[in-house]
Amino acid sequence: MKTVRILMRAVLLGMVSLLSFANAEYAKYKDPKQPVAVRVKDLLGRMSLEEKIGQMVQIDRTIATVQFMKDYSIGSVLSGGGSTPLPQASAADWVNMINDFQRGSLASRLGIPMIYGIDAVHGHNNVYNATIFPHNVGLGATRDPELVKRIGAATALEVRATGIPYVFAPCIAVCRDPRWGRCYESYSEDHKIVQEMTDVILGLQGDPPSNLRKGVPYIGGKDKVAACAKHFVGDGGTTNGINENNTVIDMHGLLSIHMPAYSDSIIKGVSTIMVSYSSWNGEKMHANRELVTGFLKGTLKFKGFVISDWQGIDRITSPPHSNYTYSVQAGIQAGIDMVMIPFNLTEFIDDLTDLIKNNVITMDRIDDAVGRILLVKFSMGLFENPLADLSLVNELGSQAHRDLAREAVRKSLVLLKNGKNESHPLIPLPKKAPKILVAGSHADNLGYQCGGWTINWQGFSGNKYTRGTTILGAIRSAVDSSTEVVYRDNLDSDFVKSNNFDYAIVAVGEAPYAETAGDSMTLTMLDPDPSVITDVCEAVKCVVIIISGRPIVIEPYISSVDALVAAWLPGTEGQGVTDVLFGDYGFSGKLPRSWFKTVDQLPMNVGDPHYDPLFPFDFGLKTESVPSIVARSTSAGVDGKPFVFLVMISLIFALYFTG
């Protein structure tokens, strides 16, 4: 009997121990059945000051280690432009690197997962073999929000294929001066077009439910990513288009031109917003509490987190980093929640810790920042699915996404001129011709075709750094097998005159650039492109294709060209260009920006009193596709109009079998 009592007591003690262990292990923040707000509150209450500050930190992958992630409870890691695990890294390489960092985070005391971010501004542009879509200026020319939403969804899949759940996109700047080096990142000079294009957020994050409270972030599953609307606010309105400079405008102008797209983005559930390097009427946006906390978080009711730009708080002072303690204070008090440090990790942590302990920054401000970061992490299911797998690797650069990019290219092209007079259009070009010339610096250069923010921060030159189809490659694929295609990037008039070319396609424009490196007071094309245009177009019928991130100087050459196309920065799918050149599809794009005559006119936007452009905002000639012309002509013949039918068929044959 005594033995039985001893056994029963042992069993009871074991059960009590198990219950105690279970209760100790249960935490509301780990329970996905709990409401997000409850989970945030529970976790926030368990965190030390050091862990809270760690969550506010974003560091570059080049300084991140598994031990750093664990010891400092780091909130986020990013890849800066061109920062990759290794050259031509595969999707699996990316997944493995990110999972290693994540395991460090999960091994920390509370196991809070980090969120990895990357610039995916026209597709997953840092990654080898990814689909590179047209830059935003080209998408603005499509006037097609539904297309942009599909591009957002495709980009999300390719980003998730590499294990990344967060993108620093879209840029919703309203570029008011093409001299700005980031103008190609802006959809348009017209805020209404920019507002429409915020539908890309719905593609990236998913469609939020109708009952979602305004301002609350929404990410709809493992094939979606957290988006980031940027750069708050007025980045596209700086004086003379100088990057990171001062936007001089009154509150009414700021609210009517630069702010509307942020309101739309918040309604669509955007998760994060990045602050601009620029100033508003002399006050740095990274230190502007009135706009970041007062207007963005207060008036617009944004509930996601606000992130700084790369070393953004450093640049509050001039010169940058000259008083870092003040920069930390000003940035955090302004309402920045996560700081893209990205290197001086311990300096930031030490300065912020001292500011809190000395009661300069309140714990309420820290709890607000960390609570917002945790809200996004819980909302996207990061606690339930912190580690990536290889299930989506085949989405990277998939044919379906390349087809979508090709569609975007053909819809983005704007036909500015078609023939020396209206009665003799040059486009559509005949696919069958004895001999044609392809010329210019941009005809066979994938890097030039893609522009900045491609593989590297400043882009690249040549064809070996990622996969895609150049304009020359697309032309060779499109023309009849009997057509001889002669290519020269540079040539002289004697060469052109000595060959009996039926017509020429000349691709010219800007070299790649990003941010301040792209600021330009002259807006000229590369040398020797102007002489190539002159030498070719004065000797043979020619189409000139402008590859640029903005309007550039073309008035001096326009009288010599037969047809002129603004192709913007089309990306990897050059066949979208030939789709419309040869008439498989018609031209439909419209200028998202006014095209100036001379740079002396700038800034000049539609509605300005001195408005006198070479080509006005919204301009774009239309063409019909050859199949639709044939179909319409056939229909006319069936309806008892054989004469019209015969005339149209004659025209089609003339297009295809003569130069």
Image (cartoon, rainbow, N blue to C red):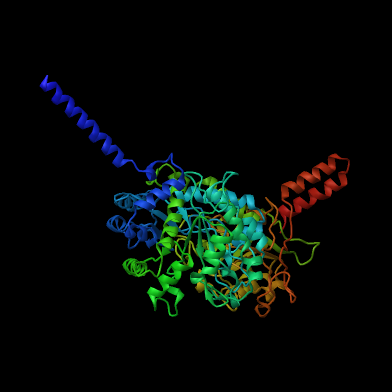
Instruction: Please provide percent x and percent y for residue 22.
Output: 29, 37
Instruction: Write down the quadrant of residue 498 in the picture.
Output: bottom right
Does any portion of residue 565 appear in the rendered image?
yes
Q: Which image quadrant is residue 368 in?
A: bottom left
Number of dots carrying numbers:
0
Q: Hey, which residue is sitting farthest left in the picture?
A: 2
For the N terminus, the image quarter is top left
Seen at 79% across and 66% down, the residue is 421
Which quadrant, please, contains the C terminus? bottom right
Above-or-below relation of 490 to 261: below
Position in image of residue 268 (x %, y %): 58, 52
The answer to whether residue 355 is above or below residue 5 is below
Residue shown at the point (60%, 58%) measured from the top left: 263
96 vs 614, left or right, is left
Q: Position of residue 373 (x, y in %)?
A: 44, 55
The x, y position of residue 398, in whole percent, is: 50, 46
In terms of depth relative to the viewer, which is nearer, 656 or 612?
A: 612
**Residue 513 appears in the picture as rendered:** no
Q: Which residue: 72% across, 46% down?
A: 627
254 w.r.t. 196: above or below: below
* 462 on left or right of 536: left
Position of 212 compared to 80: left or right? right
Q: Quadrant of residue 77?
A: bottom left
Q: Nearer the viewer, residue 570 or 58?
A: 58
Question: Relative to the observer, which residue lies in front, 463 or 141?
Answer: 141
Q: Nearer the viewer, residue 166 or 112?
A: 112
Residue 505 lies, with reference to residue 401, above or below; the image says below
